[in-house]
Image (cartoon, rainbow, N blue to C red):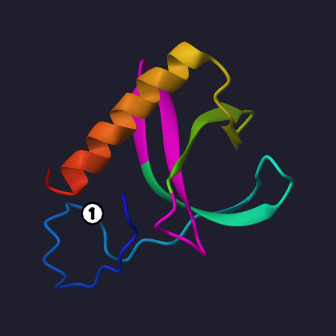
């Protein structure tokens, strides 16, 4: 998936609001380096919501998937630790990426 600009007449074929605000998160990678990540897509699987985030400085880099959890009206991004859950959501993400790229 790649991030791209949408204007009112972009002709992108997507059914979405072109006037949407950007959701930015600061995420530390495995080396502890913080990166600004932008939420570009959400999807649901087995009654659980997931978010795909792209590096704001390097949008061509692979997306990162987090589970979205809510607790007392607060929303959190949670890393996916379970291998079975990861395999399932990664397969969904790859299918979304293929359809977005017209493959």
Question: In x, y percent, where is residue 84?
Answer: 52, 14
Q: What's the residue at 51%, 45% (across, down)?
A: 51
Which residue matches tag 1?
Answer: 16
Locate residue 90 relative to residue 29 in the image: left or right. Answer: left
Instruction: Tell me if 4 is positioned left or right of 72 in this view.
Output: left
Residue 15 is left or right of residue 43, and the answer is: left
Q: Closer to the camera, 94 or 15?
A: 94
Return the x and y of residue 19 as percentages of the image width and height.
37, 77
Q: Is residue 35 magenta?
A: no
Q: Residue at x 50, y 69 (%)?
A: 59
Q: Residue furthest right?
A: 32
Q: Where's the N terminus, which quadrant?
A: bottom left
| Secondary structure of the residue carrying numbered label 1 | loop
Q: Residue at x 60, y 76 (%)?
A: 57
Foreground: 65 or 69?
65
> Which span of residues is magenta-colored?
42-61
Horizontal side of 94 relative to 63 (left or right) equals left
Q: Position of residue 46 (x, y in %)?
A: 42, 18
Q: How many marks?
A: 1
Which percent across, then down, holds residue 69? 64, 33
Magenta-drawn stretch, dominant element (helix, strand or loop):
strand
With respect to residue 16, does 84 lie above or below? above
Towards the viewer: 41 or 73 = 41
């Amino acid at each position: 998936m790649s991030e791209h600009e949408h204007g009112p007449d972009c002709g992108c074929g997507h059914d979405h609001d072109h006037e949407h605000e950007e959701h930015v998160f600061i995420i530390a990678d495995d080396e502890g380096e913080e990166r600004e990540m932008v939420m570009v897509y959400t999807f649901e699987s087995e009654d659980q919501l997931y978010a795909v985030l792209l590096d704001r400085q390097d949008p061509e880099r692979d997306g990162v998937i987090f589970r979205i959890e809510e607790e007392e009206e607060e929303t959190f991004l949670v890393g996916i630790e379970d291998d079975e859950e990861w395999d399932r959501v990664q397969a969904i993400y790859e299918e979304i990426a293929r359809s977005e790229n017209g493959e």
